[in-house]
Image (spheres, rainbow, N blue to C red):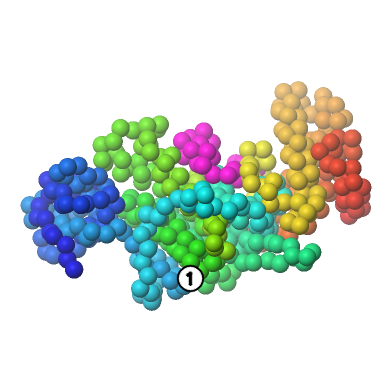
Amino acid sequence: MRGIEYKGFTRIEGPVVITTRSRNVGFNELVAVYDRDGGRRLGRVLDISEDWAAIQIFGNSTGLSAEDSRVEFLDRPMELRVGTGLLGRVFNGLGEPIDGYGSIFSSVRRDINGLPINPYARTYPRDFIQTGISAIDGMNTLIRGQKLPIFSGNGLPHNRLAAQIVRQAKILSFDDGEKTAEQFVIVFCAMGVKNDVARFFLDDFEHSGVLSNVVVFLSLADSPSLERLVAPRCALTAAEYLAYEKNMHVLVVMTDMTNYCEAMREVSSIRGEVPSRKGYPGYLYSDLASLYERAGKIKGSSGSITQIPILSMPNDDISHPIPDLSGYITEGQIVLDRELYQRGIYPPVAGLPSLSRLMKDGIGPGMTREDHKDVSSQLFAAYAKVKQVRNLVSIIGEEELSPADKRYLKFGERFEQIFLIQNEKENRDIGRTLDLGWKVLADLPKEDLLRVKEEFIEKYLEPATAA
């Protein structure tokens, strides 16, 4: 059924057009815009007043005339067609198939705007996710239902790291002492990325054999800004259907959130809104929260959504509004370090700024290993000492260091070369990761291992030293 059409626009400003408002028009409502030749393009309502509505078009306004164009309010929000046929498919940022296989066979549609999960309906995340990466599993553990972003910078290997996590991530659980592993369904969303980056991910998914288990949403760099704002909502809508209606464990990887925020700033500027920090709109925090808070586990469903958003920090500035606000919303962050990367260390995960706030509830006996918490705590403490000694070396030189400081300097090198560094094809289980932690801690005198229980030192340190 067609809605009422209105002819003509009050004005056209780039991809935003202003028109007479229809009755009962709501925010984010879908709109069809027709040019003088009958060509149809979609848009959505950005803003409304008593008499006018601002509409942003998915694309550009080329060919539209203020006098001859027509607009039709479709009286429904933007929706995504969902079903199990989503798996193995590639869509653009608007949820339209671009892999040549046509629409999926399903009559089920869901509003892409969604809602953050009601806190009362949440269940607390506790299940350990093994990524096979020691820097994450050992010291910044990812938990099922968590949102744990990767803070990176231009030129750093965050794409390689994300692809490795997609290939290797699995949920480990222990039932009566037996270890079982469950695989993830992956929802991958790329916003504002170049063609070569999109090709890298698609090729990696295909070569590793996981593509049939992945739903891909691609909004490339030459796509309209509004499509970048819609893409993560389409991805999360697909994830919610698979997790809460089909009871699957879904891992959502979104890159690059900085491109998403840049698109938001562009749209805000077109709308004439008063800018906040560095020109971003004042609602940047609440908008990011509306995406991040769609992760988690809910009562009554065995499925879950775990999020790994990736954002590149402008000028490697962790205090920039995008990483700064993201850190307030998410449960920690994985920070990539440029100095480590320049020294050839992969993955270049910075030891001290990285953090997983839910780690404490997903490790220990019956989840990983009894010594996990102590080993992680001791590695953090020792590496913090390494950073102090390295700063001291830059002032007085290595020759003036005490024997104890030189020992920590050696520990820092071995920690990075044995524990931290690993091939991107190497998939370490949690036992191997903790054994490597003990191996590097063996370089320190036992009296310095203040964060490790004596019983663990006797049980694990000697075998590691012998190895």
Q: Position of residue 302 (x, y in %)?
A: 57, 64
Depth check: give the residue in front, 276 or 456.
456
326 part of magenta stretch: yes
Q: Quadrant of the C terminus?
A: bottom right
- Residue located at (54% from left, 63% from top): 301
Part of the protein shown in magenta? 318-342
Depth check: give the residue in front, 109 or 428.
109
Q: Position of residue 340 (x, y in %)?
A: 65, 43
Can the viewer see residue 201 in this picture? yes
Depth check: give the residue in front, 181 or 214.
181
- Residue located at (51% from left, 63% from top): 243
Drawn side of residue 368 relative to residue 100, left or right? right
- Residue located at (25% from left, 45% from top): 47
Vertical comparison of 71 with 11: above or below:
below
Vertical comparison of 305 with 410: above or below:
below
Can the viewer see residue 344 in this picture? no
Q: Position of residue 242 (x, y in %)?
A: 49, 66
Q: Residues within 10 Å of mark 1 (few under 14, many from 20)?
A: some
65 part of magenta stretch: no
Q: How many marks?
A: 1
Q: Position of residue 110 (x, y in %)?
A: 37, 63
Depth check: give the residue in front, 316 or 56.
56
Drawn side of residue 235 relative to residue 249, left or right? left
Vertical comparison of 394 with 193: above or below:
above
Residue bearing the label numbered 1: 87
- Residue located at (13% from left, 60% from top): 4
Amino acid type of the residue that numbered disc 1 sits on in the rendered structure? Leu
Image quarter of residue 264: top left
**For the residue labelled by badge 1, is the local secondary structure a helix, a strand or a loop?**
loop
